[in-house]
Image (cartoon, helix red, strand yellow):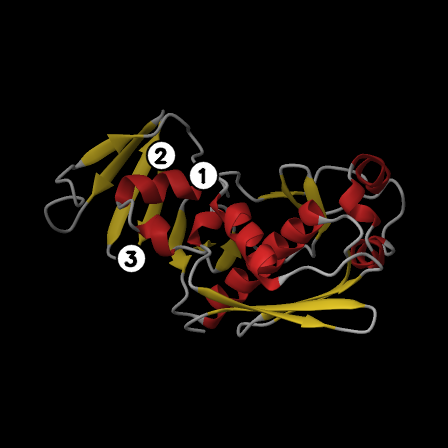
Amino acid sequence: MTTIRFRNNTYTFGNCDLNLQYFDSGDLHGNDNFRIPDQNPPVYEVLNQIDPTLMQSAMAAVIDGKTVPLTEKITKDCMLDIVTLEENEGKQIYHDSLAFLIAQTAFACNTEWQLAAITVSDENCTLQFTSNAQMPEYTAIKQQLTETIQNTAAIQIITGFQKEMLTETYASLSQPYAQTLLAQYDDYDFVPIAARQNFVLPITEKTVLVTNPSVIKEYTITLQYTDDGFTVVCQHSIA
């Protein structure tokens, strides 16, 4: 049996059962126990069973003090919590994820808009693009970003692919920003990446992104033109 401690409650599961031991009357539905069809369920399944509203604010999870994506599987007894926008770490994850979605949006609009740099903090994210093509219009880029976020596809963090295979498969890795990050790896090294549909960017091993882009909302976007391209600045509107 595996035991999870989440805030004021203890949960145990094993043999495909997850049994809740509450200090009060049960979960918000009055249930005392429930089933999850996975002996090592991902965090998001556990949170959905405890209280589905948790997923509306969760940027990531914390397992025994380590911040991990909501897709992380629970394999042993642990202390579990979530990261939200109430914390600076949650804002950092929010803006890291928003930066990835902006990069995906720009690449889908025009592959000649080449991503050159990304700067992220808990306050905002800034993406610099170089381009010899027609510059984007503010209304069009904002609308396309909205559509990108509303798409139900999840953001996946993957570590099991070698550099050579990735660069031969994904055109987005030819961009200057991606090439700079890939330069530290040999062809047969495994590279951590963030992936959504056919768009991929390298990330650091410590990077955590939201799983469900629908939590990305209430943001402002600024478009600035430069001599050789343009810059996009985004931030959560209450950051």
Marks 1 and 2: which is nearer the front?
1
Instruction: Look at 15% across and 51% down and name the residue there.
Output: 23
Q: Amino acid at mark 2?
A: Met
Q: Residue at x 35, y 41 (%)?
A: 46
Instruction: Evaluate whether residue 95 shows in this view.
Output: yes
Instruction: Identify the element where label 1 is drawn.
Output: loop
| Residue type highlighted by circle 3 | Arg
Which comes before the other along the chain, label 1 or label 3?
3
Spot occupied by residue 218 in the image (x, y as percentages of width and height): 42, 63
Mark 1 to mark 3 CA distance (whole Å): 18 Å
Answer with the quarter of the image where residue 64 lies: bottom left
Percent position of residue 197, x then y: 63, 37
* Residue at screen point 47% across, 45% down: 150
What secondary structure is found at the residue carrying circle 2? loop
Which quarter of the rendering shows the N terminus? top left
Point out the image quarter for the C terminus: bottom left
Question: Any mark on residue 42, and which?
Answer: 1
Q: Which residue is mark 3?
A: 7
Q: In the rendered structure, which amino acid carries the disc numbered 1?
A: Pro
Residue on which the image places disc 2: 1
Q: Is residue 230 above or below residue 56?
A: below
Residue 232 versus residue 114 in the image, above or below: below
Q: In the image as oriented, which residue stretches furthest toward the left?
A: 25
**Left or right: 210 as drawn, with respect to 183:** left
Q: Nearer the viewer, residue 114 or 144?
A: 144
Q: Is residue 78 left or right of residue 141?
A: left
What secondary structure is marked by label 3?
loop
Q: Quadrant of residue 140?
A: bottom right
